[in-house]
Image (cartoon, helix red, strand yellow):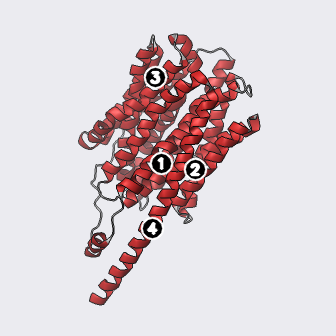
Amino acid sequence: METTKKNYTPLIGSLYTNFIFQGMAAIILSQNLNALMDSWQATVQQVTLVISGIGLGRVLILYFAGYSSDKFGRKKTVQLGIISYLIFFLGILISQNYLQGLFFALFAGFSNAFLDTSTYPTLMEAYPDEKDNSSLSVLNKAFISLGQFILPLLTRFMLNHGIYFGLVFIGCALGLFLNLLYISKLGFPERAEIQEDAPQVKEEMTKKRKQPLFKVEGLALLVFSFTCVSTFNIFILWVPSFAESLHLMNHSNSLVLVSAYSIGSFASVFLTSLIVKRGVAPTLLLIWCTLISLFLLIGMTLFPSVPMFLIGSIGIGVFAAGGIWQLGLAVLLELFSKGKGRITSYYSIATSVSVMIIPYITGQLEKIDVSLIFGLNIMLTAIGVIAAVIIRYRYKKIMNEWHEIDTEVAELKGIVE
């Protein structure tokens, strides 16, 4: 099996490279907000509508992307994802107005869905003997953070030196094109249906277990998915503008706050994984991380200063964007183990709805006052804390009941044998 791992290393590296550009694509429009407003003769609200197009594209294509991955193969779906990003990066540059920009933004959403639905299964199929593939899957977040760290630094450099903003878009397209050529020459692992062992004892346990209620803990987890993503998406979209509106930083320096956020997010991916491996309950982590994010947002709003904004940016990266979304999904799949694909799509759609509507809503709030956007973020994060508390309470209750039943069944099995 060592040989298999070695053979697939170039493939995995190439797949992770896509996520660097995915991280850049998520923030490149907001990072170039002023340049795009000038280029399209558009308002802030019109550009944020274009940003919302990314979420809309993901929602529209999500089902087909999963079907494509299973039906036509992982490789073709990955290639579709890369080509969609090429259309996005180059399309934004050739757009003459925000409506054309909105059309091309849809392709970033398409790509996001294509890459997600093909990359995760490929990781599992490349290393089928790994007992825990989560460490491989979590790494994608690290590469997304890497992209979100690099892009603001590039944008700031270009602003300070008066370089055409579109060169970053062209650079991203070129990098993706080279990766497309490279990945087209690589072999992908054979698709495999992963079947779970279903011994008789497990069937007996399942029959006796009281099933979780989707309208309670399931709904709480979908709300958490929405609020968790909203917390860090609002932050990375608007923290530069918020700092500028308070006269804390000029435009080029304020972009660095997104890089600070990305450093926190990058480090937290590994930190979160380590904490969970040490035995800390994921549901407890959901509460603490969301609560600390809430305090940081309140602190930045009530006590605005450059040090506070830097601490807040790193902190939001660590506590809101460092893997708690993935932990929420893991809890959801543990509670609702039947129809994992369907359940995962619900969780993902909640995220996509956030990516679709939040930029538009915040764009409208910007007309009144940028500080209202952070007020909205505080409110949504507070709802996330409430959802996390409900998840923790219900999860503990269900797990205790399941443990008692499992013990009872195991004892009965021992008597029979």
The reply to whether callout 4 and callout 3 are in contact (CB within 8 Å) is: no
Label 4 neighbour load within 10 Å: few <14, some 14-19, many 20+? few
Among numbered discs 2 and 3, the one appearing first in the sequence: 3
Q: Secondary structure at mark 2?
A: helix
* Within-10-Å neighbours for mark 2: few <14, some 14–19, many 20+: many
Q: Is residue 268 visible?
A: yes
Question: Which is more N-terminal, label 4 or label 2?
Answer: 2
Q: Amino acid at mark 3?
A: Val
Residue 65, disc: none
Q: Nearer the viewer, residue 145 or 212?
A: 212
Q: Which mark is residue 397?
A: 4
**Relative to residue 247, is residue 406 drawn left or right?**
left
Specify the amino acid type for callout 4: Lys
Give the distance between the C-alpha atoms of the residues marked 4 and 1, in whole angstroms. Answer: 19 Å
Q: Earlier in the sequence, mark 4 or mark 1?
A: 1
Asked if disc 2 and disc 1 are in contact, CB closer than 8 Å, the reply is yes
Q: Quadrant of the C terminus?
A: bottom left
| Percent position of residue 216, x then y | 40, 56
**CB contact under 8 Å: marks 2 and 3:** no
Q: Which residue is mark 1?
A: 224
Work out whether residue 97 or residue 388 is closer to the camera in this orientation and state it: 388
User: Which residue was labeled with disc 2?
Assistant: 290
> Badge 3 local density, few (<14 within 10 Å), some, or many (20+)?
many
* Inter-mark Cα distance, 3 to 1: 25 Å
Q: Position of residue 178 (x, y in %)?
A: 44, 28
> Could you tell me the amino acid type at mark 1?
Phe
Give the residue at x 42% y 24%.
Answer: 105
Indicate which label's residue lies in the foreground, 4 or 3: 4
